[in-house]
Image (spheres, rainbow, N blue to C red):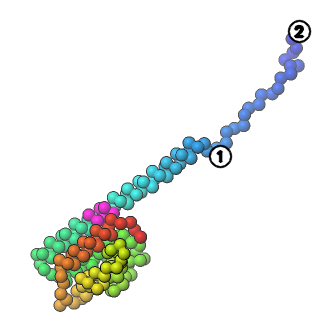
Amino acid sequence: MTPAPENLPLRDIHLPDPVSWWPPAPGWWGLLVLCLLLVLVIRALINARRRGRLKRDSLTLLQQLAEQFQHNSDGQQLTVQLSVLLRRLALSLYPRRQVAAMTGREWLEFLDERLTPDGNEKAFSEGTGQVLIEAPYNPDCRVDGEALIDLVRRWITRNAGNRRS
């Protein structure tokens, strides 16, 4: 005879514990690392493109200033415009609190430090670049425009392609 269902030795149904969201499976960790790497690569590409555009635009403006100097031979105007170009570029490349307040000899030394990898060349503070602080206020100051343009071109080429420091 078959026993009644109430009398059968059956256990109650037990469901497994719900799956916890922590810790994530290894695949989720891998996806997180991949997303972070993707964000870093995109940021590096954007910064490189920005620096490339800044360098290209600065060199184009420098070329226009050189052509303008060839036509009018106004050394005082050239030094004013080159000084403005260098200041704008430095403010774009380096922290504002580091660059904005610099004037005179301190400004020229800042430019010298970033002209060569070792920072030992003194082309701004002791050479051709000294006219950047003298010529705008002294119309009788002699300006070697070609040498000054070449010096500024070297500074732009060296710095506009580098990372901010």
Q: Amino acid at mark 1?
A: Trp
Marked residue nearer the N-terminal end (1 or 2) = 2
Q: Position of residue 145 (x, y in %)?
A: 18, 79
**Residue 153 is inside the magenta segment:** no
Quadrant holding the C terminus = bottom left
Most foreground residue, 115 or 17: 115
Q: Which residues are magenta?
A: 51-56
Reply yes or no: does residue 53 show up in magenta: yes
Q: Which residue is mark 1?
A: 22
Horizontal and vertical percent for residue 51? 33, 63
Q: Residue at x 36, y 84 (%)?
A: 106
Q: Residues within 10 Å of mark 1 (few under 14, many from 20)?
A: few
The image position of residue 129, as x and y in percent, is 26, 82
Q: Amino acid at mark 2?
A: Met
Q: Is residue 85 left or right of residue 96?
A: left
Q: Which residue is mark 2?
A: 1
